[in-house]
């Protein structure tokens, strides 16, 4: 038995968490969940959306599965996600993006991995109101963070038999900050002659991704471009409902989908749990429960390929619960 921190989140979080924990249980995963609520729902009781107990639990267990948590726009608390990534130094955000058989999209040859720097850039949260009509936000890029995310990307490429790493920036405009990022990736690329290395500006990347996504393999990006490009790539393979992710640091890893708490469909039993399930499958591999991971993955892919039970975001009419039951029946 392995103890894993479970953050059910808010919005559609609890619904998809229920689905995923049901599937893992039925598949025989050897997991003891340490349930830690966070987000809007705990603010009233505990005065913060991210109580210390959540961070302590992940520090102790070293691995967590996390459903999305709402960040109110404008004033209020800082994003739970950003705080969590900072507190645990989860510096690498890994988002594999691959077509799934049975989900119709414009492309059938997408197989890329986004490696997003997770701790700095505009997410450093250094903002000020200069005067009533002017606000300023500071973008931080450091050599240390850029080198280690570059190293992570190349190591990932080597271990996963990937051939090409592309560094993404806007170094023509942000000459110092993105320039530093790019120089660091370039420096690390020298240590990996077996991996092809390319550079691209983020605007050009967006255009090329929607024309020829097969040209890309591993993408390494600063935080904000990584965030935006992740959603774009999710769109290439069928939407946010199937886009998985992981935040990885030296001492802990938090597995979570790319999507947010989807307040527009909260409580309607129509959220797609696939992104959280795929994240959970990677988590199972991370804790060496590979056989269970494979069993669930096979059943998930079979269910999608059959196309009988699909949630509305994938063009189906099934509820979250019906889709979940179909996956369990296919185990
Ligand atoms: P969102 O990802 O929650 O939703 C965007 C669109 O995709 C919506 O139409 C939604 O219904 C749909 N969608 C997302 N996930 C889906 C799923 N599993 N099944 C079916 N449809 C799905 O993005 P939005 O609306 O910008 O953000 C909502 C809240 O989530 C915000 O407070 C944001 O800060 C937070 N958020 C949290 C994240 C996290 O906890 N890691 C990541 C991204 C956003």
Image (cartoon, grey):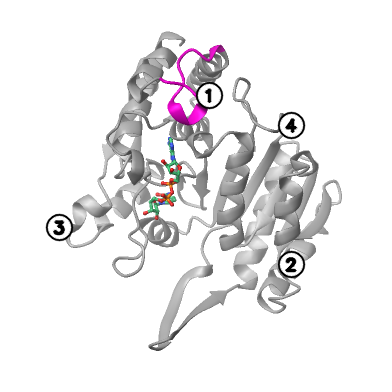
Mark 2, mark 3: which one is toward the viewer? 3
Q: Residues in magenta? A: 306-317
Q: Is mark 3 within 8 Å of ligand 1?
A: no
Q: Nearer the viewer, residue 146 or 266?
A: 266
- The answer to whether any part of residue 5 appears in the image is no
> Label 2, on which residue?
182
Alpha carbon of mark 2 to alpha carbon of mark 3: how far?
Answer: 43 Å
- The single residue placed furthest to the top in the displayed view is 329
Q: 260 left or right of 149?
A: left
CA distance for labels 1 and 4:
26 Å
Spatial CA span between label 3 and label 1: 40 Å
Residue 248: x, y in percent? 52, 49
Q: Is residue 95 left or right of residue 49?
A: right
Q: Earlier in the sequence, mark 2 or mark 4?
A: 4
Marks 3 & 4, CB-CB < 8 Å contact: no
Task: Give me the disc on residue 44.
Answer: 3
């Amino acid at each position: 038995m392995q103890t894993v921190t479970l953050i059910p989140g808010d919005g559609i979080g609890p619904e998809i968490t229920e689905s995923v924990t049901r599937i893992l249980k039925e598949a025989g995963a050897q997991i003891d969940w340490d349930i830690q609520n966070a987000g809007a729902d705990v603010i009233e009781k505990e005065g913060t959306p991210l109580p210390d107990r959540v961070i302590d639990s992940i520090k102790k267990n070293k691995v967590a599965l996390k459903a999305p948590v709402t960040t109110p726009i404008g004033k209020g608390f800082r994003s739970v996600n950003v705080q969590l990534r900072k507190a645990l130094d989860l510096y690498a955000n890994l988002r594999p993006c691959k077509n799934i058989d049975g989900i119709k999209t414009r492309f059938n040859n997408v197989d890329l991995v986004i490696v997003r720097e997770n701790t700095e850039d505009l997410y450093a949260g250094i903002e000020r109101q200069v005067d009533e009509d002017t606000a300023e936000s500071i973008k931080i890029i450091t050599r240390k963070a850029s080198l280690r995310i570059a190293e992570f990307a190349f190591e990932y490429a080597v271990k996963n038999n990937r051939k090409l790493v592309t560094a993404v920036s806007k170094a023509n405009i942000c000459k110092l900050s993105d320039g530093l990022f790019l120089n660091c990736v370039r420096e690390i690329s020298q240590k990996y002659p077996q991996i092809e290395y390319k550079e691209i500006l983020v605007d050009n990347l967006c255009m090329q991704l929607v024309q020829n996504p097969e040209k890309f393999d591993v993408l390494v990006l600063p935080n904000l471009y990584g965030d935006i490009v992740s959603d774009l790539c999710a769109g290439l393979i069928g939407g946010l409902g199937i886009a998985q992710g992981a935040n990885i640091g030296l001492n802990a890893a938090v597995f979570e989908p790319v999507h947010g708490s989807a307040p527009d469909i909260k409580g309607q039993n129509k959220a797609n749990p696939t992104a959280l399930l795929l994240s959970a499958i990677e988590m199972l591999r991370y804790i060496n429960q590979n056989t269970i991971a494979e069993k669930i993955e096979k059943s998930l892919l079979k269910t999608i390929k059959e196309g009988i039970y699909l949630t509305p975001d994938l063009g189906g009419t099934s509820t979250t619960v019906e889709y979940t039951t179909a996956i369990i029946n296919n185990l």
